[in-house]
Amino acid sequence: MKNKNSSVAILLILTLFTSCKKEKLNLLEIRTVNFENLTVGSDLFWNGSDGAGEFQSSDMTFENNFNSSYGSWDGFVYSRKDNIATADYTNQYSVYDGSNGANKFAIYYPPFGMDEYATFLNDSAYLIRSIKICNSTYTALTMKNGDPSFAKKFGGIAGNDQDWFKMTIIGFNSAGDSLKSLNFYLADYRFADNSKDYIIDKWTLLDLSPLGKVSKLTFRFSSSDNGEYGMNTPAYVCLDDLKYETIISGNNQP
């Protein structure tokens, strides 16, 4: 004859086991926007001349505006160029890191007085963990050497001028409201000891988690070198390896 208590215990164990099998687990996944899915062609860059108006990498769309009348662009483009020697506008697609090799990256250049955006698909919001930042060669060499047509040499002739070039990263929600921002100096010559002055010349990891959850990002620039028509420092920044968190659902069934 079966023991009644044993039957109840077996039923309880089976119930618990079945419940555990059906329990859903939320798993944290870290994704990376690294632009390696994009094609650059023989020029080693894409600037929007095909009229696409944007490009996509991972879960993000990057706005681009190409002016066919002038062959100019603003917003985002992508490239794999790392010419660190040519100092003029013709080298606007190169990152100022000679070890970049075949690595692909994005470049941002804002329209005058406006913003363009890197936006998550469907206006979804994610916590962005980090991004890699570097100067473009055109910007870096303009700051390092000056340009007789429009821009000063950072530090001045004696090296004592307290010059700087700053980028502000701003996060927005899906409604377009700005949330939080943080600053990063792409060049800083404000030190009393001139040997500490620097221009960012390597891919540099920047923590973006203080921005919280965002649906889109933009980048704004300011500089100590300004003229009648605004900032003289070329307003470019190179971007790569944007990491963000997403939650995926699963269960613990074998």
Image (cartoon, grey):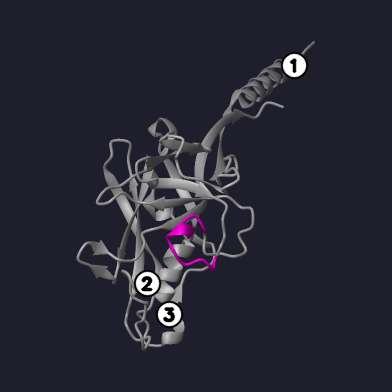
Q: Name the residue under label 3.
A: 197
Q: Is residue 91 left or right of residue 191?
A: right
Q: Which amino acid does label 1 sit on?
A: Asn
Q: What element carries label 1?
A: loop
Label 2: which secondary element: loop
Q: Would you name the residue on which mark 1 appears?
A: 3
Residue occupied by mark 2: 147
Q: What crowding class fits label 3: few (fewer than 14 Cα within 10 Å), some (14-19), or many (20 or more)? A: some
Question: Residue 143 sits in which quadrant?
Answer: bottom left
Q: Is residue 179 magenta?
A: no
Q: Which of marks 2 and 1 is nearer the N terminus?
A: 1
- Give the percent coordinates (x, y) of residue 136: 47, 61
Quadrant of image for the C terminus: top right
Residue 60 in view of the camera:
no
- Residue 86 in magenta stretch: yes
Q: Main secondary structure of the magenta part?
A: loop
